[in-house]
Image (tube, coloured by chain):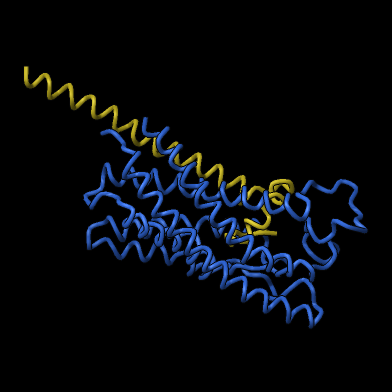
């Protein structure tokens, strides 16, 4: 009985650990996409809208 | 739902920090950018720029949209500051939550959050900008944009990895962190063939040189405020609202 509980909880923690890594990875991916669009995207419209912010964060600009 | 809490916390932290930095920028930094734009030269000799030529004599028929000077431009700048702050908060909060789950170190508090803020300033400003591509006003000569963006990204990634190794790795491997962080600087940041400004008038050069040193100083002060506030608030958010389940 007890060993059953232990093996169950081990299994559960494995799948949830994967999910934790996935959630962290997803959050970082969303952040990277946002940073790219605002700070680095080459399209003129993105550059013009965020121009002063790009300079003030010392992102490469122009 | 850790992801939802990370996202919501990052949005709130990002709005507060970005708004604060946006106001600092409005009063201290943007004025320097506007002053430098006065000296920008026409597009035949310099890189295309949206703001110097909004009033007259523009030859392109398909000028890309840009915000009007004044309230619209200020609004877009503050909005962009907030968006960048949300992006940095997403990195910081998710990695802090991972730290709380996995690391054999003290849990995150607002105080340790402030220290993470200092580390982030090293990653995103000190290493790529102060030690590489200096903060510059519009109209400064620089190497090809794509090369600078590539070097910037590499420098940020390796500095972050280097700090992580220094902090988390066992003592005998810590030196590896220093080596990682040093690599982009040994390669060297992409530099233009000749330093200076697109405008070659001596009066303009003198003015732009002064504006550049003011700009460097004030972006450094602004970034220090920005990252310490971002780190402290992120630490508070992780302490209160974000927990990854194991």
Tell me what hue chain B is rendered in.
Answer: blue
Say which quarter of the image contains residue A37. top right
Say which quarter of the image contains residue A54. bottom right
The chain letter corresponding to yellow is A
How many numbered callouts?
0
Residue B214 on image: x %, y %: 62, 74
Residue B143 on image: x %, y %: 67, 65
Q: Relative to the observer, which residue lies in front, A27 or A22? A: A27
Task: Please say if A7 is above or below B61.
Answer: above
Residue B174 on image: x %, y %: 28, 62
**Residue B33 in sight here:** yes
Residue at position x 44%, y 56% in the image: B229
Task: Please say if B113 is above or below B237.
Answer: below
Q: Is residue A22 left or right of residue B150?
A: left
Query: Which quarter of the rendering shows the N terminus of chain B?
Result: top left
Task: Please say if B156 is above or below B63.
Answer: below
For the view shown, which residue lies furthest in the top direction?
A1
Residue at position x 54%, y 66% in the image: B129
**Residue B188 in sight here:** no
Query: Which quarter of the rendering shows the C terminus of chain B?
Result: top left
Residue at position x 77%, y 55% in the image: B69
Q: Is residue B171 left or right of residue B134?
A: left
Residue at position x 76%, y 66% in the image: B37
Q: Relative to the observer, which residue lies in front, B152 or B204? A: B204
Residue B182 on image: x %, y %: 43, 67
């Amino acid at each position: 009985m007890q060993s059953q509980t232990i093996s169950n909880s081990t299994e559960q923690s494995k799948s949830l650990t994967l999910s934790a890594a996935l959630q962290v990875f997803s959050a970082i991916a969303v952040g990277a996409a946002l940073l790219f669009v605002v700070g680095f995207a080459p399209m003129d419209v993105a550059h013009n809208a965020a121009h002063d912010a790009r300079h003030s964060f010392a992102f490469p600009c122009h | 739902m850790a992801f939802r809490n990370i996202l919501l916390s990052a949005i709130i932290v990002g709005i507060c920090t970005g708004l604060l930095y946006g106001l600092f920028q409005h009063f201290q930094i943007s004025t320097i950018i506007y002053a430098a734009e006065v000296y920008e030269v026409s597009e035949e000799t310099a890189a295309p720029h949206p703001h110097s030529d909004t009033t007259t004599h523009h030859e392109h028929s398909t000028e890309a949209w840009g915000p009007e000077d004044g309230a619209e431009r200020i609004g877009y700048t503050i909005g962009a500051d907030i968006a960048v702050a949300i992006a940095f908060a997403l990195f910081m909060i998710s990695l802090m939550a991972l730290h709380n789950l996995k690391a054999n170190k003290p849990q995150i508090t607002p105080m340790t959050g402030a220290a993470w803020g200092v580390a982030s300033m090293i990653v995103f400003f000190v290493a790529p900008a102060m030690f590489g591509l200096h903060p510059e006003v519009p109209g400064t000569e620089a190497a090809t944009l794509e090369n600078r963006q590539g070097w910037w990204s590499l420098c940020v990634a390796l500095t972050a990895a280097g700090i992580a190794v220094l902090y988390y790795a066992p003592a005998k491997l810590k030196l590896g962190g220093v080596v990682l962080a040093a690599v982009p600087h040994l390669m060297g940041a992409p530099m233009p063939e000749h330093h200076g400004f697109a405008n070659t008038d001596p009066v303009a050069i003198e003015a732009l040189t002064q504006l550049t040193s003011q700009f460097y100083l004030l972006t450094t002060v602004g970034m220090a405020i920005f990252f310490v506030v971002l780190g402290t608030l992120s630490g508070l958010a992780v302490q209160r609202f974000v927990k990854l389940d194991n």
